[in-house]
């Protein structure tokens, strides 16, 4: 599997069209402090998951704090994505994933990391149900 502990450009969901599709046709899941949107896709690509992360300006006013949270969420995903990637590659499925932070205050990395682990495990259960 390419890039086990990376989070490079190919793993990021950047396309406006793809993001719009995730919101319009995708599944929604809440795992406080995250709201997760995801959808299966048929795109040909080397990574099974493409991820976008959003920290709304309405919730976190200061750009410095939003950027800090984005870095923390990206790092947590980078460290904990292996199970999700392995499961999806085994089933030969690909998904687009959009993670939105819905808390009003900045949380520390340990809390974000723990919640990302729970979120990804719950996402795996949802995917296996489909």
Image: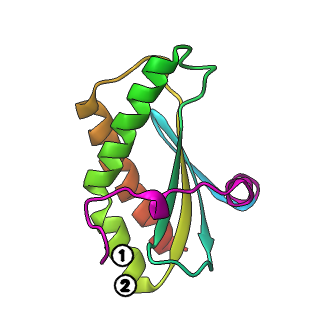
For the C terminus, give its image quadrant. Answer: bottom right
The image shows residue 83, relative to residue 43, as above or below, that is above
The x, y position of residue 27, in whole percent, is 63, 58
List the residue tagged with mark 1: 87
Is the image coloured rainbow, by chain, by secondary structure, or in one colour? rainbow
For the N terminus, give its image quadrant. Answer: bottom left
Number of labels in the image equals 2
At 30% across and 68% down in the image, what residue appears? 3
Judged left or right of residue 125, residue 117 is: left
Q: Nearer the viewer, residue 40 or 45?
A: 45
Circle 1 Cα neighbour tier, 10 Å, few/some/many (<14 / 14–19 / ≥20): some
Kindly identify which numbered label has been placed on residue 90.
2
Start-end of magenta stretch = 1-24
Membership of 117 in magenta stretch: no
Residue 71 is drawn in which quadrant? top left
- The reply to whether discs 1 and 2 touch (Cβ–Cβ < 8 Å) is yes
The image shows residue 35, relative to residue 95, as above or below, that is above
Membership of 11 in magenta stretch: yes
């Amino acid at each position: 599997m390419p890039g086990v502990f990376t989070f490079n450009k190919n793993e990021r969901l950047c396309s406006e069209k793809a993001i719009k599709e995730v919101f319009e046709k995708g599944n929604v899941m809440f795992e406080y402090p995250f709201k997760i949107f995801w959808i299966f896709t048929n795109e040909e690509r080397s990574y099974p998951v493409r991820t976008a992360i959003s920290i709304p300006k309405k919730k976190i006013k200061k750009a410095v704090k939003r950027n800090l949270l984005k870095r923390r969420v990206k790092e947590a995903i980078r460290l904990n994505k292996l199970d999700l990637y392995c499961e999806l590659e085994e089933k030969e499925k690909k998904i687009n994933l959009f993670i939105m932070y819905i808390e009003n205050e900045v949380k520390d990395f340990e809390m974000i990391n723990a919640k990302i682990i729970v979120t990804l495990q719950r996402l795996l259960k949802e995917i296996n149900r489909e």
